[in-house]
Image (cartoon, helix red, strand yellow):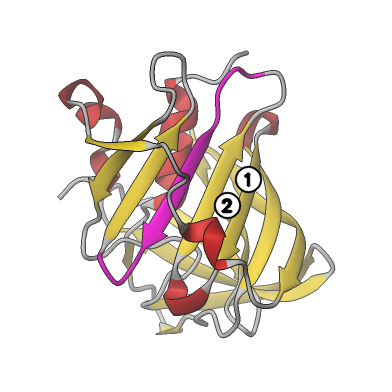
Amino acid sequence: MTMRWRDLAVFTFLAGMSFCEGLAAEPLPRPQVDFRLNARTVEEGRMSLARGASGRMRVELTRPGSFGSMTGLIDFMRNRMLMIVAFPGMEGRAVDLELPADFALVDLGGEGTRTASDTVAAERCDVWRTQEKHSGTFIDSCITPDGITLRAVVDVNGKRTVVFEALDVTRGEQDPALFDLPKGVKVTKLPSSMKGLLPSLLP
């Protein structure tokens, strides 16, 4: 199946979760290093994510055999994301999104309940349970001691589903160019026809 609006919903879910505190809550580990990771998502999708200086992030979502891809350039200092959606008719354009104050990507922040330990992508991580405050969904995230989220499991149609799982992780300084808008790409505001698809990203 080609990349479609469901992929956009997955992208925004992964990139826009807001959390409540869990029972017996402890502070969640926060990223301590810059890194890059590759991960699998639902329906054989693939994600590449990089964290650079000042916490800036780049996330790319693709699916084998699809005709489109999505790239998000996130600036937490400005509380904005540029979403480059490579769909027919949107070539060379990026959508400028203002992020809500409680926006979270792999740096979840806040507090949660530590429930178990596991190994993902040859990395030891602790499983933390949090609750998405808008939907009430419980999210189990496996986070390394230095704050890298390696896996997220949520309820999808009543079933616990892995929506994000790292395949490999590389720590170290990232190329600053990864987080800049490519030359020639024009920035536009979010089309009104798409606003209903991005409820978790809109104020």
Where in the figure is residue 188, as x and y percent of width and height? 24, 35
Residue that appears at 44% across and 56% down:
138
What SS does tag 2 mark? strand
Pick the quarter of the image with the N terminus.
top right
Judge whether residue 182 is colored magenta: no
Residue that appears at 29% across and 72% down:
77
Q: Note whether 26 is above or below 171 in the view shown.
A: below
Q: Splitting the image into 4 quarters, where does residue 144 fall?
A: bottom right
Left or right of residue 143, residue 5 in this image: left
Q: Pick whichever, 132 or 73, lies toward us.
A: 73
Where in the figure is residue 182, as x and y percent of width and height? 47, 45
Q: Pick whichever, 151 or 117, lies toward us.
A: 151
Q: CA distance from mark 2 to mark 1?
A: 15 Å
Q: Splitting the image into 4 quarters, where does residue 111 fall?
A: bottom left
Left or right of residue 138, residue 171 in this image: right
Q: Note whether 116 is above or below 156 in the view shown.
A: below
Q: Which mark is residue 47?
A: 1
Q: Which mark is residue 153?
A: 2
Q: Pick whichever, 113 or 146, lies toward us.
A: 146
Judge whether residue 67 is colored magenta: yes
